[in-house]
Amino acid sequence: MTPREPADLVCSAKACRGTARHAVVWRNPSLHVPGRRKVWLACEDHREHLRDFVQLRGFLLEVKSVDELTEEDG
Ligand SMILES: [Zn+2]
């Protein structure tokens, strides 16, 4: 890992230690209040896998680069 990599941005996929490049933002309406945003971090290999997982359940809000994450994204 190089000093330029944000050290704590690790892919959310099970058993993956890849550096996260993307953020899958989602919300489960039956669990989370409106406005709540859950974020899964994803490496290049798992971006589509994690996106599809929440999209199939109708929870997907958006997918964006980790560079675009804001304080509101929890
Ligand atoms: Zn991964």
Image (spheres, rainbow, N blue to C red):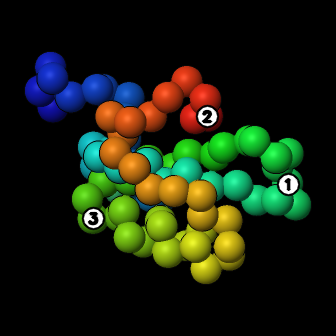
Secondary structure type for disc 3: loop
From the viewer's perspective, tell me whether residue 68 is left or right of residue 53: left
Q: Which numbered marker is on residue 45?
A: 3
Amino acid carrying mark 2 in the image: Gly
Measured in 3D between alpha carbons, the distance from the residue under mark 1 to the one under mark 3, in whole angstroms, is 28 Å
Secondary structure type for disc 2: loop
Q: Nearer the viewer, residue 13 or 26?
A: 26
Residue at position x 61%, y 79% from top?
Answer: 56
Q: Identify the residue at the far top of this view.
A: 3
Secondary structure type for disc 1: loop
From the viewer's perspective, tell me whether residue 19 is left or right of residue 39: left
Q: N-terminal of the two: label 3 or label 2?
A: 3
Q: Nearer the viewer, residue 38 or 5?
A: 38
Residue at position x 15%, y 20% from top?
Answer: 3
Amino acid carrying mark 1 in the image: Leu
Q: N-terminal of the two: label 1 or label 2?
A: 1
Instruction: Locate the N terminus and report the quarter of the image it occupies.
Output: top left
- The x and y percentages for residue 51 are 48, 67
Q: Which residue bears the numbered disc 1?
A: 31
Q: Is residue 45 visible?
A: yes
Q: Which numbered marker is on residue 74?
A: 2
Q: In which quadrant of the rendered view does residue 65 lie?
A: top left
Residue 50 vertical position relative to residue 34 in the rendered view, above or below: below
**Is disc 3 surrounded by few (<14), some (14 to 19) or many (20+) residues within 10 Å?**
some
Q: Nearer the viewer, residue 34 or 5?
A: 34
